[in-house]
Image (spheres, rainbow, N blue to C red):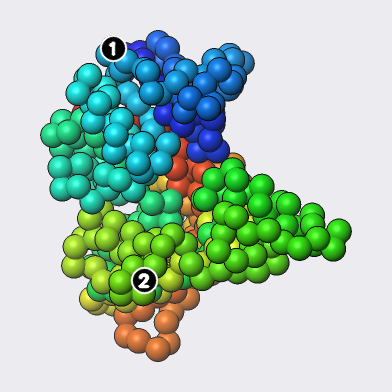
Amino acid sequence: MKKQKVAVMGATGVVGGEMLNTLYERNFPVSEVIALASDRSAGQDVSFGETTLRVKSLKDFDFTGVDIALASAGGDVALEYAPRAAKAGCVVIDNSSAWRMDPDVPLIVPEVNAGAIKDYKKKNIIANPNCSTIQMVVALKPLHDIVPIKRVVVTTFQSVSGAGKDAMDELFNQTKGFYMNQDAKNEEFPKQIAFNVIPQIDRFMDDRMTKEEWKMMAETKKIIDPKIKVCANCVRVPVFVGHSMMVNVEFEGELSMNDAKKAWRTAKGLTYIDLESDLEYVTPVEIHGEDNVYVSRLREDQSIDNGLNFWCVADNLRKGAALNAVQIAELLGKA
């Protein structure tokens, strides 16, 4: 793969910074890296390995000559700037939800549907899926390849980093304030997040589902199989980094626990932990900074025929965002 001129949109954010780190750690072949952000953040310094980059304003930036843009600047920004960059010949890999359900934009998890990348030239835009969707489909696809999945019921326990740096600061400040007898101030979340759980991520829709729950349903269908039925329940928890989920899967036929274990043990980007191992099961604290999706607590569902339950955790800033985007960029070199 020849060296690429890469721009990172939203470089001063949590995910943007992780994108820069991941590009460096994976030795992505870059000829130049450009850090972009809003006018408010322009002029700040960010790190790319041992190099310091001066942040440039996205508003005034000319994408001519840029090969790839990794974007994590929000949906509204993506809708405005992704087409502009694409028109200049730059391939945009967007982390927001703005382009995910566009039929002309591939929605890619490299371990799951790498072949879909062939369609990126329709708009020169590739969508990075929702963080929770990514880790779930990495776990589901090896099983679906053996016996088709009929239905998935998932409950997520999502960390505050999924809502950005200000959300992480709010958890920290509320936690500190609790021990100082200060009232909790809710700005990033609808209710107190410290020492609490919130059964709402994103806005409520007309059918009372939240947008986050809808994303998991719609994106799973687009990535794996439109026939899969998905019921998602998404909960925000007072964890800084790392999304967790309990997943119940109903198959169209019998799939044994042993066959599921065999599939996971050979799957790319996934680590299976058995109860008989030293770890027994995996929690978010243990996988902070890890690239793989971790699956544990596998068991049969006694309430239905052909059902399995499992626990799934991943670093939402890595595989759930930055790593997946960089892996897509790596795929482009082979497309």
Q: Quadrant of the C terminus?
A: top left
The answer to whether 17 is drawn above or below residue 190 in the figure is above
Looking at the rendering, in which quadrant would you find the N terminus? top left
Placement of 312 over or under 65, stated as above or below: below
Residue shown at 50%/38% (left/top)? Answer: 15
Check whether the beta carbons of the residues at disc 1 and disc 2 lie within 8 A of each other.
Answer: no
Residue 211: x %, y % from top left:
37, 62
Residue 318, position as x, y percentages in the image: 50, 42
Residue drawn at x 47%, y 18% as measured from the top left: 56
Q: Residues within 10 Å of mark 1 (few under 14, many from 20)?
A: few
* Above or below 9: residue 238: below
Residue 151 in view (yes/no): yes
Q: Earlier in the sequence, mark 1 or mark 2?
A: 1
Q: Secondary structure at mark 1?
A: loop
Whether residue 55 is situated above or below residue 275 in the rendered picture: above
Q: Which residue does the numbered mark 2 point to in the structure image?
A: 209
Q: Position of residue 269 (x, y in %)?
A: 43, 46
Secondary-structure class at tag 2: loop
**Label 1 sits on what residue type?**
Gly
Q: CA distance from mark 1 to mark 2?
A: 42 Å
Circle 1 residue: 65
Mark 2 is on which residue type? Met
Q: Quadrant of residue 63?
A: top left
Along the line of sight, the residue nearer the viewer: 107 or 161? 161
Residue 61: name its quadrant.
Answer: top left
At 59% from the left and 15% from the top, the residue drawn is 52
